[in-house]
Amino acid sequence: MERERVEIGVFGGSGFYELIQGAQEVTVDTPFGDPSAPMTVGEIGGRRVAFLPRHGLKHQFPPHKINYRANLWAMKSAGVSRVIGPCAAGSLQPEVKPGTFVICDQLVDRTRHRSDTFYDGPKTTHVAFADPYCPELRSAAIAACESLDIPFKPGGTVVVIEGPRFSTRAESKWFSGHGWEVINMTQYPEAILARELELCYANISLITDYDVGLAGDPSIKPVTQEEVLRVFKENNERLRELLNAMIPKIPEEPACSCQSALEGAQF
Ligand SMILES: [Zn+2]
């Protein structure tokens, strides 16, 4: 039986499966090894959606051990053309409060040891990444936040650190001093690998804490893993609502340039 084409991919775990109608498990082999888990495919609002938990079914892959290339390749092989990558994140600015959803429009890569390209030669490929996130997916996310009355920020810069450790006070002060809003460990290379495969990609950062207590403000306590997990759990319910509202708002015919990212990029 020919598999029905999947249109939208979401990096998210078991918390979302109750959203899906007619869920089926799909296993994909990739030239880069195994994805974090099999995909769960089904329908949301009449659209075919694949869910893939980036940290694995048992949350066994820390951010620096995720096989990002296999995960994106699996999405592409399933026919996905649009990818939504929600993540837990820290805040670098006092006004970006825990509980806020930030629809990031920029990122700063501070990772060091990750495989972050599909193009290791012989064909040299330089993909434009000036605007790392898909404008159409971002608009759909923003419209969904507005319709649900979710506290959100319609733009922001995410700093992606290598992890698994959190930042020092000096690093955190440095990042927030640039005016950057969000800090996370998985947005890179997820975003660039999506672009290299000409997939639309957007992030929704769920703010769980203030990074290292925002250096200099003694009233704000440094992040702990316990606090991150508590707020993330609370946010998960709202994220489910957001995806349910967002997915039907995604235009069926893309008018963005993400899906022609390789034009003029190869020599
Ligand atoms: Zn796009």
Image (cartoon, rainbow, N blue to C red):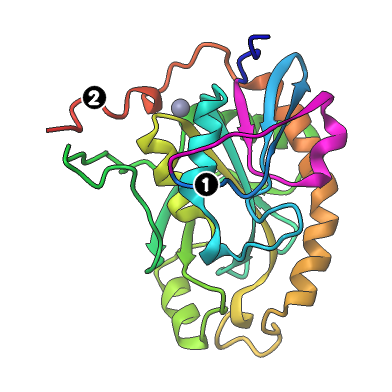
- Residue 10 in the magenta stretch? The answer is yes
- Which residue is at the far right? 18
156 to the left or right of 42: left
Identify the residue shown where x is 78% and y is 67%.
Answer: 229
Q: For mark 1, does the 10 Å Cα neighbourhood hold few (<14), some (14 to 19), or many (20 or more) residues?
A: some
Examine the rendered structure and indicate whether residue 100 appears above or below residue 18. below
The range drawn in magenta is 7-31
Quarter of the image where the C terminus is located = top left
Give the structural element (helix, strand or loop) at label 2: loop
Identify the residue shown where x is 41% and y is 22%.
Answer: 256
Quarter of the image where the N terminus is located = top right
Which residue type carries mark 2?
Answer: Glu
- Residue 219 in the magenta stretch? The answer is no
Residue 50, position as x, y percentages in the image: 67, 30
The mark closer to the camera, 2 or 1, is 2
Lower position in the chain sequence, tag 2 or tag 1: 1
| Res 263 label | 2
Taking the image as drawn, is residue 149 in sight? Answer: no
Taking the image as drawn, is residue 127 in sight? Answer: yes
